Image (cartoon, rainbow, N blue to C red):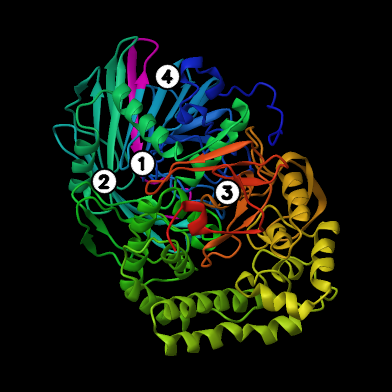
Amino acid sequence: MRFWSSLATGFAFAALAQPACARSQPGLLVNPFVGTQADFGQLSPAAVAPYGMVQLGPDTTPANHAGYDYDASIVNGFSHTRGVGVGCGGAGGDIRATLVYAGDLPAQTIDKRSERAHAGYYRVTYGPGIVAEMTATRGSGVIRFRLPRTGRVRLSVDYTRNYSKHIAARWNGASDGELRASFSAGTVCDAGTYHLHSATRLLHNGRTVAARWDGDQTRQAALTINARAGDLLELRTGVSSIDPAAASNVRETELGKRPFSEIARQTLNGWDRELSRLTIVGPRHEQALFATALFRVMQTPVAIADPDGRYRGSDGNIARISAGEQHYTSWAMWDNYRTQMPLIALIDPIRAEHIAKSLVRLYQTGKRRWATQTEPFLTVRTEHAGIALLDFYRKGITGFDVPTALKGMAAESATLARMTPDEQIEAAYDDWAVAELAADLGQHGLAKVHQQKALAYREMWLSTFDHLGPDADVVKARGLYQGTLAQYRWAPVFDLPWLKTVMDERFETELAAFFADNMFNMTNQPDMHVPYIMAWAGNPSATDAVVSRYLTQPVVHRYTNAAVRPTPWVGRSFALSPQGFADGMDDDAGAMTGWYIWSVLGLYPLTPGQPRYVVARPQVPKAIIRPSRGPMIIIGKSGAGHLSLNGSPIGTVHLEHRQLTGQRP
């Protein structure tokens, strides 16, 4: 069954060029060019390690929100940070390195035929034939330039080329060639400010260049070097939330004196290990799209603790974690609590536990809805963190301070926005999570208070959504965020039994009409769960039909985040091509690729916080889950095409998490 589009003319996949012996490595199946064209996904082919800080890749003209566009013909340099399909104007673009021959302009022509990328690696030839290769570890990046001819070359490192608002920068160059910097910029949507530090060294044919950098110390540092044809220049940079000296320690610890090839190989091995947690059986092109989607899921949140355990919190203060742990930030919870976080909980419960601890620390240090002015890394927003924590806890991920989490969730309730219809539903979901976790912990008084708060949205729902009016298909009607009344009508996933009771016989008929009238928006999160409500209500064949259509066929997409399109965009929602995504669909930190993965598996976490899945028809013959803790799980198709678990057909529309993972009740 095909769920990708035909390859674009002239589009060369690095993964498809790998030798046959390499094809079993999922990291080589990954194609980072998927979703990098124009506004299709807002992604980048940057080299990155699993959940890594450094996203080292090209900055082009033109560019999408992540600094690159597949159709671009000009490269301006290579920067070390960027968001992952995050929308607005993006964020990152820090530490942009540019290498050209003396006298040439910084903007150089790309040789598109030369571009190659797989998980953790990117390569391109540009200008007169300079070859640039990139790889990354969690907190460090390496750029290796190979020079085509003898001459003087000019290398610059710019700290002001941010995709969002540039705020400040300051660099210092020592006589031994060490280049250290501190810089600040706006986070995604310029909603806050992040502050980072870096330390860079330049190697020439493997030897450290001991020369002092020159330039404006608030903008750009530069060096001019005499080089011969075939010479290698290698820029090695560490990044830290602490200070420049800490960034130097990150670089020396994570990179050391290892050659580029060894660093790239170890990063690829790390990706192979992580991507092997969830694999599918099928044709290689199906595996490639699946591995590429999982690759995007595994890029956020970002691990920011230095090797010595230190990190800065969102309050700007330095803290330290215990050995063997990690601290995460770079949140996009409003988007990915629905799909990406439950997927991490299933395939990597050990990492989910560290993420849970990080969220608890965020509550303890003054969690805010959007980014603060003292962020340690670029980030977006943190709504619904409490729902993710409840979901983790009920799935057996309990190694975090649950009472402290509950205390933070309950305190946050008083600060939640409740003005517009969608805000009231979303706040109700958060209150529901407080009530459920409080009940689980035996705090029945607190549970009762928040249960009442959660159900208070019902009066608004009855007056606004029970019978839709002429503004039902107007994006942002009545102050809604990126959606319509017809879409947000189905948002109370925590209260579906009540919705079904209230609507009575209209529930299923109006669900069917929602899809028949093409009011479903696959390009954003507010209604991404609605296809699975039909299976929840007892009509799995209707779910299968809708999901299969959006996975396998060109469909009509009517919406942008701001309006109904004058002319619908027609195409596949997910494709193995530079476009990759439907027009206007941001991946949103693994939210949309997470939906894709769940849909291929034939399972869906309809209500995060309830440890169960809606069962649908798998799109592949077999999927194998090798979680970081617990037994292997095999999902397949039964003889009738329905989902099977470890060889046994599943005859229900719901599957408990403990049944899926083999946990004891």
Q: Dot 1, how many residues are within 10 Å of its Cα: few (below 14), some (14-19), or many (20+)? A: many
> In the rendered image, is residue 644 in sight?
yes
Residue labelled with disc 3: 587
Which type of secondary structure does the marked residue at label 2 adopt? strand
- Label annotation for residue 131: 4
Q: Is residue 29 left or right of residue 96?
A: right
Q: CA distance from mark 3 to mark 2?
A: 31 Å
Q: What amino acid type should be assigned to the residue bearing mark 1?
A: Ile
Q: Is residue 223 left or right of residue 281?
A: left
Q: What amino acid type should be assigned to the residue bearing mark 3?
A: Asp
Mark nearer the N terminus (3 vs 4): 4
Mark 3 or 4: in front is: 3
- Contact (CB < 8 A) between labels 4 and 2? no
Look at the picture and state if 585 lies above or below 152.
below
Q: As rendered, which of 591 and 493 lies closer to the eye?
A: 493
Residue labelled with disc 2: 181
Q: Report x, y in % for residue 295.
A: 49, 40
Residue labelled with disc 1: 95
Q: Dot 3, how many residues are within 10 Å of its Cα: few (below 14), some (14-19), or many (20+)? A: many
Q: Residue at x 42, y 59 (%)?
A: 664
Mark nearer the N terminus (1 vs 2): 1
- Contact (CB < 8 A) between labels 1 and 2? yes
Q: Dot 2, how many residues are within 10 Å of its Cα: few (below 14), some (14-19), or many (20+)? A: many
Q: Report x, y in % for residue 560.
A: 71, 55
Q: CA distance from mark 1 to mark 2?
A: 9 Å
Q: As rendered, which of 583 and 7 lies closer to the eye?
A: 7
Region in magenta: 145-167
Which type of secondary structure does the marked residue at label 1 adopt? loop
Q: As rendered, which of 152 and 311 lies closer to the eye?
A: 311
Q: What amino acid type should be assigned to the residue bearing mark 4?
A: Val
Mark nearer the N terminus (3 vs 1): 1
Q: CA distance from mark 3 to mark 4?
A: 30 Å
